[in-house]
Image (tube, grey):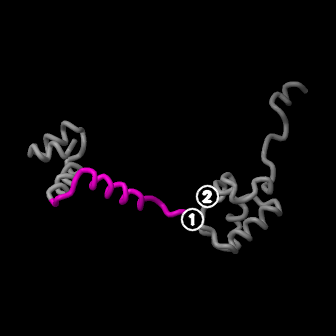
Amino acid sequence: MIEAYFHQETPVAIVAKQLKRGRQTIYNVYNFLKCGGTALEYLEQYKENKRRCGRTEIIFPAEEKEYIAKRSTEGWTPDVIIGRAERTFSCSVSTLYRRFKTGEFNVLHLPMQGKRKPNGYYLSN
């Protein structure tokens, strides 16, 4: 689409307004096309650049994994494991909970959380 506007020599401001995109985006494509590239090549380069974006995944060292697994089998919650600050960890409490949820650590080793009494307990007595 932008390539067609480029070949018609339509001004960037008009193209940006019609496509409801920022002028900088249109300029990026125009400059790529001026250098001899095609819209498909621009798209491939864009996707390759986007693939490198984002936070790199946290990988636990073996000793951290062992420590977390050992403490969770002892009945410690992730809050306690990180909160006691016996050692430094490469993640936060929420990340550690997420790792339990995804199955990296065994959820069954965590202490059971829940209500002690069912709904309506106090009304029936």
Compared across the picture, whether 120 is left or right of 95 comes to right
Look at the picture and state if 64 lies above or below 120.
below
Residue 49, position as x, y percentages in the image: 36, 60
Q: Quadrant of residue 71?
A: bottom right
State the residue in front, 89 or 3.
Answer: 3
Residue 117, position as x, y percentages in the image: 85, 37
Look at the picture and state if 101 lies above or below 86.
above
Which residue is pictured at 73% across the width and 62% down the height? Answer: 80
Compared across the picture, whether 72 is left or right of 95 comes to right
Kind of residue at disc 1: Ile
Q: Quadrant of the N terminus?
A: top left
Look at the picture and state if 39 lies above or below 91.
above
Residue 102, position as x, y percentages in the image: 66, 53
Which residue is pictured at 74% across the width and 70% down the height? Answer: 67
Residue 99, position as x, y percentages in the image: 65, 57
Compared across the picture, whether 1 is left or right of 49 comes to left
Instruction: Please tell me whether mark 1 or mark 2 is closer to you in this view.
Output: 1
The part of the chain drawn in magenta is: 35-57
* Residue tagged 2: 95
Count of labels in the image: 2
Look at the picture and state if 113 lies above or below 100.
above
The numbered dot on residue 58 is 1
Mark 2 closeness class: few <14, some 14–19, many ≥20 residues within 10 Å: few
Q: Quadrant of residue 64?
A: bottom right
Pointers 1 and 2 in contact (CB under 8 A)?
yes
